[in-house]
Each structure stands twice: as C-alpha cells, then as structure tokens.
Amino acid sequence: MFKKILRVFGRDLKTMTRDSMGLFILIMPIILAIGLSLFTPGLNDTTVNIALLESDDAVHIEFIEQFAKVELFKNTADIERRINKRDDMAALLPKGDGYEIVLQGNESEVVEMYTAMLSAFYELGTTKEDTTAQLMSFGHTVPPIKTMLVNMLISITVMMAGMLIAISIVGEKSDNTINALNVTPISQTGFVIGKSMMAGLFAMTSIIVSLLVTGYYDINWFMIILVGFSSMLLTFVIGFLEGLNSDDVIEAAASVKMVMLPIAGSIAGYELLADKWQWTMYWSPFYWAYKANLLVLSKTADWPTILFCTGMVIVLSMAVYILFIPKIRRGLS
C-alpha cells in the first residue's frame, strides 16, 4: 500500500515540477518573503535618520548612533543630495564650536525637534545614565509588524497547498485517470494520501525557505512544522472538493482562493477583536493556526499552548472532512 502511495506522490511531483502553475505557487511565497525582509523595519529601528560627515568627531558620531540611525557622508554636497530625497532626513554639520541642523524643509516636526534635542544633550554632556526614566520590556524580541506579515504569508502558503491539489485533480480528470482509479490496485484513501503528500511537501518547503529568508533561524522548527501540517488538513479537503467540481485549472484556482475569506476573517478577528470577543472566532481552524504561528514566531510559545491550538485545528478540520468525505468519494468513483 505504501509503495502505491509513493507512486502517486512521485507521479504528481514530476508533473508539478514541469507545470508552470505549480512552480509559480512554490516560488511566489519565497519572492514575497524576500520583499518582506527588505521592507519591514526592525523592532528597534528609529524613525529619525541623521546624516553626519565622516570627518566628524568620533565621540559625537558615537553619541548620535545611540539614539538615531546615522548615515555617514564624505562631504556636505553628498549630505545635501541625501537630504533632498523623499524620506525624512536631518543633518548635523559642524559650525564654529557647535553644530547646525540642516533640513530639506518638509520634514515632520518630530524629526526637527528630536535632532535639536540630541544636539543639545550632546553639548550639555548628557548621557543615558543621567536619566531618571526606567526601561520596561514586554518580552518582544522579534519585530511585531514583521511577525504578523510573515504569519500572513504562512496562511497564504497553506491556502496554496489546497490550490495545488485542486489543479492536480483537474489534470487527472482531463486525462481520465480518475475513472481508471476504480480498476487499479490503489484505494481511494491511498490516492488521497498520495495527492496530499505532494501538496504538503511543496507548501512546507515554501514555508521553511520563507522563514529562513526573513531571518527566523532560531524558532522552534518542530512547532512550526506541526502547526503547518495540521493547518493544511482543511485546505486539502477544499482542494479535493473544488478540483472534483471544476472543469479547468482557472476555475479550480479561483474556487480555492475563496478560502482566503475565512483566513482573512480569522486574522482580522485575532488582531482587532478585544479579548472578551475572541471566542467568536473559535470556530475557525485558521484562527487557531494563526495564533499558534504567532506565538512560535515571536518566540513566546510553549508546548501545552501549541498542542492545544493544534488539537483545535485538527478537530475542526476533521469535522469538515467527515462532513464532506462522502462527496469526495462520490467524485472519485
């Protein structure tokens, strides 16, 4: 039985690697991950950028670097060109015994005031040790915006796993191999498992590569893989249903994309609803998968919570599977 399942898996793997749609689905999450890694800010990135001359006093440069993002330039002409770009950038240039602030003129008031205060604190010899403020941390070591966007990317990749199955089923129908299934030694269950293995491998490969690209090296990989495979169960069911009900690849892909509605709703519910209303989203397996992935990516996950969330995903997905398995079996008959 296992060898027959591997034959289905191997055949699908060869077919999808030659199919442009399959390769696009595999590569697109990785391309999006590269974009996220380039454009999402870090947790400690300041919103104020300050330009300094390379010839400036080393003590002054070191002081400013403690409180702002510093860019060094060889001469004032280079600094003027940089300031005239579209983003907010201030410059501190030596003038007499002090420094003058150079601005383009359309910067926000915060940039001007912050730069002026830094210059004044430097002139007064003020250091971080002179403050009476206390630093408090809520334990976030990963940028929250980046974590949320990467988590959304994982959800999209999971949806694409169902799309791969739907496309594969449409191809089987066009080749009339669905009808031939009934006279082959492999069972319908083995056929379903073989098809799911292909989609699962593609999706998990994309998720793992995307996480590495976005810099999540030291997360708990066992947790992320467990949550990933469990959250694919429902998209697998939807992929089989839509593949059997569709007549062409475009129709199948469009039908599976409707899964984005409950996925988007689950993400919005988790991020926007108050704690007292979170229970309204407990029906969605995507809600529990998003919550579990968020904990893993933010490095605040523990096994009891992950196992509970994963259990909820499996229970809810299996309920949908049991509801629709008769329809899937009729479609494969």
Image: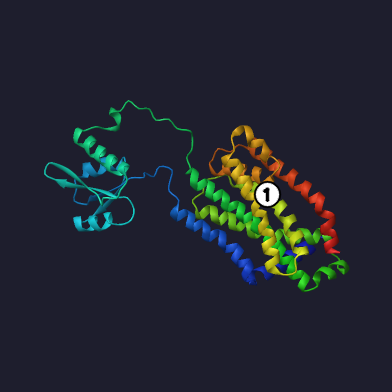
User: Would residue 330 appear left or right of 35 to someone viewing this image?
Assistant: right
Question: Quarter-wise, where is residue 74 in the image?
Answer: bottom left
Quadrant location of the C terminus? bottom right
Q: Residue furthest right?
A: 183
Q: Nearer the viewer, residue 281 or 106?
A: 106
Dot 1: element: helix
Where in the figure is residue 272, as x and y percent of width and height? 57, 40
Quadrant location of the N terminus? bottom right
User: Would residue 154 appear left or right of 36 to someone viewing this image?
Assistant: right
User: Would residue 37 appear left or right of 232 to someone viewing this image?
Assistant: left
Disc 1 target residue: 231
Q: Is residue 31 visible?
A: yes
Q: Residue at x 67, y 38 (%)?
A: 280
Q: Is residue 187 visible?
A: no
Question: Quarter-wise, where is residue 23 in the image?
Answer: bottom right
Where in the figure is residue 278, as x and y percent of width and height? 63, 36
Q: Residue at x 80, y 73 (%)?
A: 176
